[in-house]
Structure formats: C-alpha cells, structure tokens
C-alpha cells in the first residue's frame, strides 16, 4: 500500500470518527466539544485553575473564561474560592452526571466503528493505535491535551496508557 494512500485512509477515518464522536458528545453533554473536554478533565483532576484547564483543552485564556462562564451558567461547574489570581474550577453534581453521559456517548459512538473487526483484528488495531498515539505525543507534546476526552480508567485498567508512557519516556 502506498504511504500516500495510507495517509489518506487514516485522515478520512480520523475525521469521520471525530465527527461522529464529537457530535454525540455535544448532543449528550449539552455543551461544546471544548466544554465536554474541560468537564472530563475536571472529573479526572478537580480544582484546576482556569488557565491550566484551558491549556489542557487547547484554548486561549479568553476562550477558556467564556467556556467556564457558560459551564457555570449551565450549573455544570462552579468556581471555588481562589488563591491570588488562581480560582479553582470543579464539577457540580449535575456536571458529574454530564461527564458520565459524555463518556457513555463517546463509547456508544465508537463501538459500532469497531463492530466489523474480529478479536484478532481488534488486538492488532489496538497495538497499532498505541504506536500511533505515542508518535502523536511526540508531535503534540501534551498528554492532557491529547487525552482530553479519554476515559482514563478504561485505558489504564489492564494496560499502560501509550500517551502516558510516551510522556514518562520523554521525561527520563
């Protein structure tokens, strides 16, 4: 197979999967894709300041402030008492429920994509995706950004996260 064709197949697959997944996440979570990502990040690490939260979801400071304002207005996150200029942001109970819905919607949208693969093909694809993700970490350089919608427990329950491993490898 020509590398040009392989790249084209990968690009079309990535875009289609992303479109399907993000459409489902947005409709279920009732928030933007960046809002959903911010909530998933906060579920994993509550109390982040808005600046750090924005860095982890790939938004500028002004865009992060607007997103947090929108999430607060929707009753999904709350701002805590701050220390200096840093104001921690955390999920409300409604936000925690929305995160569960977002994760379920993401999983439900991805399951049919893999349905046509047998067990061996799934195992092979998992190995290939681990290599691709490790390589992507080398380009993106930010595990939090790369895994902003990941279900971390699912990824690390029986294996090592390839992005986390790439990050540890870079640090040594």
Image (spheres, helix red, strand yellow):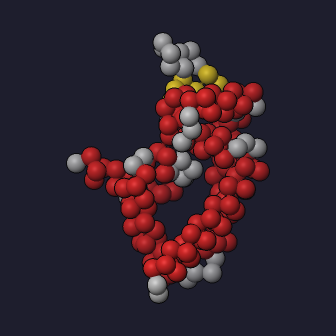
Is residue 123 shown above or below 159?
Answer: below
Outermost top residue:
84
**Residue 119: image location, x then y, percent:** 52, 80
**Residue 126: image location, x then y, percent:** 46, 71
- Residue sitting at 54 percent across and 47 percent down? 148
Is residue 3 shown above or below 146?
Answer: below
In the displayed structure image, the side of residue 126 where residue 111 appears, left or right: right
Is residue 2 shown above or below 101?
Answer: below
Q: Of 42 and 60, which appears nearest the observer?
A: 60
- Residue sitting at 38 percent across and 60 percent down? 134
Q: Of 97 and 124, which appears nearest the observer?
A: 124
**Residue 109: image location, x then y, percent:** 68, 63
**Residue 17: image location, x then y, percent:** 63, 65
* Residue 34 quadrant: top right
Q: Is residue 97 visible in the rendered structure shown here?
A: yes
In the displayed structure image, the side of residue 65 where residue 134 appears, left or right: left
- Residue sitting at 68 percent across and 55 percent down? 22
């Amino acid at each position: 197979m020509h590398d040009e064709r392989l790249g084209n197949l990968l690009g079309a697959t990535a875009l289609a999967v992303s479109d399907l997944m993000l459409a489902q996440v947005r409709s279920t979570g009732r928030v933007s894709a960046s809002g959903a990502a911010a909530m998933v990040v906060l579920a994993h690490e509550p109390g982040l300041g808005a600046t750090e939260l924005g860095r982890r979801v790939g938004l500028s400071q002004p865009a992060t402030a607007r997103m947090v304002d929108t999430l607060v207005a929707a009753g999904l996150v709350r701002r805590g008492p701050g220390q200096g200029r840093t104001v921690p942001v955390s999920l409300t109970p409604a936000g925690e429920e929305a995160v569960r819905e977002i994760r379920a919607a993401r999983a439900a949208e991805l399951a049919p994509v893999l349905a046509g693969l047998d067990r061996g093909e799934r195992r092979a694809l998992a190995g290939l995706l681990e290599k691709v993700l490790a390589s992507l970490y080398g380009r993106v350089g930010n595990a939090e950004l790369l895994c902003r919608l990941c279900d971390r427990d699912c990824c690390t329950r029986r294996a090592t996260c390839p992005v986390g491993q790439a990050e540890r490898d870079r640090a040594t």
